[in-house]
Image (cartoon, rainbow, N blue to C red):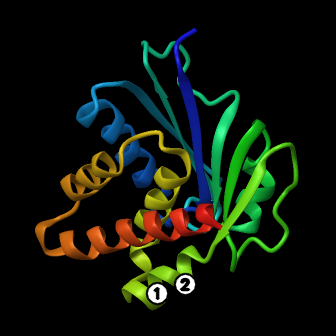
Amino acid sequence: MAERYELRFSGAGGQGLITAGIILAEAASIIEGRHAVQSQSYGPEARGGASKSEVIIGDEPIDYPKATVVDACLAMTQEAADKYAVGIKDGGVLLVDSDFVKNPPQGNYKVYSLPIMRTAKVDVGREIVANVIALGAMIALTDVVKRESGEQAVLAKVPEAFKDLNKKAYSLGFDKMKEVLAG
């Protein structure tokens, strides 16, 4: 059977998680030449309500564009964790923002925590790049695409004036996750 990897990015509308999903799909498909699809869903109150972006990456064409057995899930808010951590497969992973998800749902998967929004605000100085920090962390956690592919896709998506800011954010997310994994 061909390899298929399903990821879900979830949080509040306006946090840039749809963009993070699109960037990941582009890293896999455009840069690495693999098959990828991205889909999204918003709560009825687009800004502030729970939203999700799903990315499926595979070695062969993808016949169904929605995640059914999630390998890795990101939850930036408690509401998103409660609503979207369902469906994580046994042995999968859940990454939560430690400042906003105080009670991560438990299951037969591993839960990791990072202060994603705080890292954006304190270490980078701009909360707007929290989605890029989260993307870097998810790529470090899953190895679903190469580090360089993720960075290249991020830099292809942002205006010239914000390339250094986003490169720093991506590297911070990636490196902080690798530190957590190293124990």
Residue that carries the numbered disc 1 in the rendered image: 121
Decide: few, some or many residues near mark 2? Use Cα within 10 Å; few <14, some 14-19, many ≥20: some
Amino acid type at mark 1: Lys
Instruction: Determine which of the numbered discs, if any, sits on residue 129 in the image.
Output: none
Residue 117 in the image, given as x and y percentages of width and height: 54, 78
Amino acid type at mark 2: Arg
* The furthest residue to the front: 182
Q: Residue at x 58, y 8 (%)?
A: 1
Under circle 1, the secondary element is: helix
140 in relation to 178, above or below: above
Residue that carries the numbered disc 2 in the rendered image: 118
Residue 150 in the image, given as x and y percentages of width and height: 33, 50
Q: Are marks 2 and 1 in contact (CB under 8 Å)?
A: yes
* The furthest residue to the left: 160
Q: Residue at x 75, y 48 (%)?
A: 85
Q: Nearer the viewer, residue 124 or 38?
A: 124
